[in-house]
Image (cartoon, helix red, strand yellow):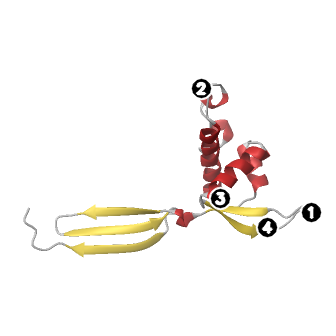
Amino acid sequence: MKSPYDPSNRPQSVGRRVGALRPRSLRQLNARVLLGFLRIHGPCSRADLVRQSGFSAPTVSSAIDYVRKHQVVEHLGVGASNGGRPPDLLRFNPTYGYVIGVDIEIARIRMALADLDRVLVGRWAVGISGSTC
């Protein structure tokens, strides 16, 4: 199955002019695609993102700067070099936000909290007594 973030899997309308996109909208769209790469492929460098996405280096840098400013991506440090400048490694920040699930039953309420990588952070259950329904 092809990854939804594979450049060859883009909708046909992406390659042709559908309407004018404002620079901010385009940056957000590019950032969303790059976040998908970071979530699927784990820590990687900007150069890796350029190769995987097919975007230009300035496009990747602009989009990554945008999401780093909002703390959705975090800098991990310097990676191993293959003879050139050591790459700065980036990763998706799973603690940027959280997801809560709630299950409401007649006699109890169950809740769970997970980070954006689906790692369970906490679980709670509360019994409901004296229900008058």
Q: Secondary structure at mark 1?
A: loop
- Marks 4/3: CA–CA distance: 18 Å
Marks 4 and 3: CB-CB under 8 Å?
no
Please name the amino acid that badge 2 sits on: Gly
The Cα–Cα distance between marks 1 and 4, rounded to whole angstroms, is: 12 Å
Q: Which mark is residue 83?
A: 1
Mark with earlier residue (4, 3): 3
Q: For numbered disc 4, what is the local secondary structure?
A: loop
Residue at x-position 60% and y-position 45%: 28
Residue nearer the viewer, 7 or 45: 45
Q: Do labels 2 and 3 touch, CB within 8 Å?
A: no
Question: Which mark is drawn over residue 68?
Answer: 3
Residue furthest out toward the right: 83
Tell me what residue is drawn at x 68 percent, y 53 percent. 64
Question: Mark 2 or mark 1, which has the lower sequence index?
Answer: 2
Looking at numbered disc 4 in the image, what kind of residue is underneath it? Answer: Gly
Question: Residue beneath label 2, please?
Answer: 19
CA separation, marks 2 and 3?
Answer: 28 Å
According to the image, label 4 marks what residue? 79
Inspect the image, locate mark 3, and give the three-letter code of the amino acid beneath it.
Answer: Arg
Residue count near mark 2 (Cα–Cα under 10 Å), binned few <14, some 14–19, many ≥20 = few
Are the two marked residues, 1 and 4, in contact with CB atoms closer than 8 angstroms?
no
Q: In the figure, residue 120 lies in which quadrant?
A: bottom left
